[in-house]
Image: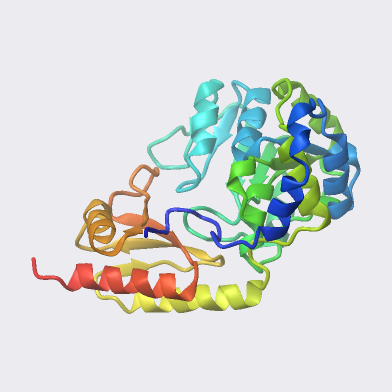
Amino acid sequence: MTIDFTKDYYRHADLTGLKAHLAERLDLIEEYPDRQPAELEALIAQKHGIQPEGVLLTGGSIEAIHIIAAHYRRYASIIPQPTRREYANACRIYRHIISYENADTLTSLPPNRVYWICNPNSPSGNVLRKGFMDYLVRRSPRYTFVVDQSYEAYTKEYLLEPCEMKDVVNLLIIHSIDKTYGVPGLRLGYITGHPSVISLLREQLRPWPFSSLSLEAGKYLLEQGQPAVTDIDAFLVESERLRGLLRDIKGLRVYETKTSYMLCELLDHTTTQLADFLEQDYGIRIFSCASYTGLSDHFFRVASQQPDENDALVAGITAFLEKPE
């Protein structure tokens, strides 16, 4: 049996109630879904204490990124690295001028700019403080800030609250129902922002973007569901235990994190070598960060799972780094 550490969310959510709920409503596949999912968007708005007009449901956080990139096509996009690759992928499709804020990139940018900030960041697990983010957005009203909070359920740090930012026109916040509830197969995310901007983004939506069952699942989760991680305190304690065990392994550097996932660096080996060993000898899969700007094949990310799985990962990496050359 494979133990999968490639995912950036908790893989052991209790979905019993959701599955039973959907099993009783399979007849929904015979009906057209809502063209505009007003009921689910209203539930999301109620959760955040904002107007429904300030919510745009999307097909996961990836579609949210593409919708925003499409609306701001040909803008300059500043994407601090390393971070989620989807920002640059979407911006390239829509002809953005991209800066990674490195010394070898552009020294001057046009005034039409979008700043993409993943907070909590992936793959590093860094979190920018709420007060700093609020100051950053409000002090630069001529620029648009996209703050991706898809991983907000995996940290205890204070993040931007849509209800506190509803007067801000230059801010869009991305959220992920998929990651929060551990249901990536549903492909549900949403954007919160000023209603005037959300109405423009809505024009970028595909026709009939959601299935009847996914909308029903979303409504259930918002009304009756529980997050994938039901006890964030205990979960982060286990995550820190995993990080401590990994840090004790000679030849491995583990970076600070404010989340349940962490960035690791092999000092004398490559992730490709480690991944092959772990999968063949331990049935464990890890996530390589070789394709991330600013990183290399020495970096990988793991997200804390159950204690026995975490222990197996530590044992596997230890065996790899201690085996004779």
Position above or below: 197 against 310: above
Residue 192 picture location, percent across and down: 78, 42
Q: Where, quadrant-wise, is the N terminus in this rendering?
A: bottom left
Position above or below: 54 against 18: above
The quadrant where residue 233 appears: bottom right
Residue drawn at 49 percent across, 47 percent down: 83
Identify the coloring: rainbow
* Left or right of residue 258, residue 195 in this image: right
Q: Where, quadrant-wise, is the C terminus in this rendering?
A: bottom left
Residue drawn at 37 percent across, 62 percent down: 264
Would residue 164 be seen by someone viewing this image from the given angle? no
Q: Who is closer to the viewer here, 237 or 285?
A: 285
Q: Who is closer to the viewer here, 156 or 311?
A: 311
* Left or right of residue 164, residue 214 in this image: left
The quadrant where residue 60 appears: top right
Residue drawn at 65 percent across, 51 percent down: 149
Residue 282 picture location, percent across and down: 28, 64
Residue drawn at 36 percent across, 75 percent down: 247
